[in-house]
């Protein structure tokens, strides 16, 4: 197996995980979630932050917050996980696929401009 992401646990992580298990707060609520939202909102200089259960839910919430929906277009990389495309379709918008850079596998900035139309509401890198 080729590991996609090797966990790096050091410092207080084990203590915090044990505390969550010991207090039965292994979920999307609890003191650590509240603490994270508070610290993250300060870090990004926002009045508030909302934790979601996963990246798909976060992308969906972002699209809804931006008012993206039926008739809108969102540019996404042609090489991506299915989640961004699913969330775009879920709100009724249309994904527009942009080529990725051969060296970095991220959106090729030189290819995006030609894809932007009056219906383009966002670019998901």
Image: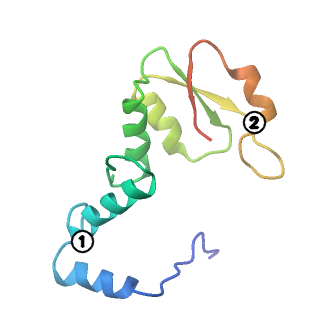
Query: For residue 76, what is the image quadrant?
Result: top right
Q: Position of residue 63 (x, y in %)?
A: 43, 32
Residue sitting at the far left = 23
Residue drawn at x 51%, y 40% as measured from the top left: 84
For mark 2, give the secondary structure. Answer: loop
Side of 29 where 47 appears, left or right: right
Q: Residues within 10 Å of mark 2 (few under 14, many from 20)?
A: some
Q: How crowded is mark 1: few (under 14 residues within 10 Å), some or many (20 or more)?
A: some
Q: Residue, x 32% and y 87% (percent of image)? A: 15
Identify which residue, 2 or 74, lies in the foreground.
Answer: 74
Residue 22 position within the rendered picture, expressed as x and y whole percent measured from the top left = 18, 84
Find the distance from the CA under tag 1 to the CA under tag 2. Answer: 40 Å
Q: Pointer 1 and pointer 2: residues touching (CB < 8 Å)?
A: no
**Residue for badge 1:** 26
Q: Which quadrant would the C terminus be assigned to in this image?
A: top right
Q: Which residue is drawn at 57% across and 71% down?
A: 5
In percent of the image, x 57 and y 77: which residue is there? 6
Observer-nearest residue: 106 or 95? 106
């Amino acid at each position: 197996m080729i590991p996609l992401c090797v966990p790096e646990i050091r410092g207080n992580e084990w203590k915090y995980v044990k505390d969550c298990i010991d207090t039965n707060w292994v979920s999307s609520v609890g003191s650590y979630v509240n603490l994270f939202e508070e610290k993250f909102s300060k870090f990004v200089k926002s009045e508030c932050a909302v934790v979601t259960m996963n990246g798909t839910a976060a992308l969906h919430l972002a699209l809804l917050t931006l008012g993206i929906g039926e008739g809108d277009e969102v540019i996404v990389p042609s090489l991506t996980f299915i989640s961004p495309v699913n969330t775009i379709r879920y709100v009724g918008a249309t994904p527009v696929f942009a080529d990725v850079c051969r060296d970095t596998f991220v959106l090729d900035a030189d290819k995006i401009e030609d894809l932007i139309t009056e219906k383009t509401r966002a670019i998901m890198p």
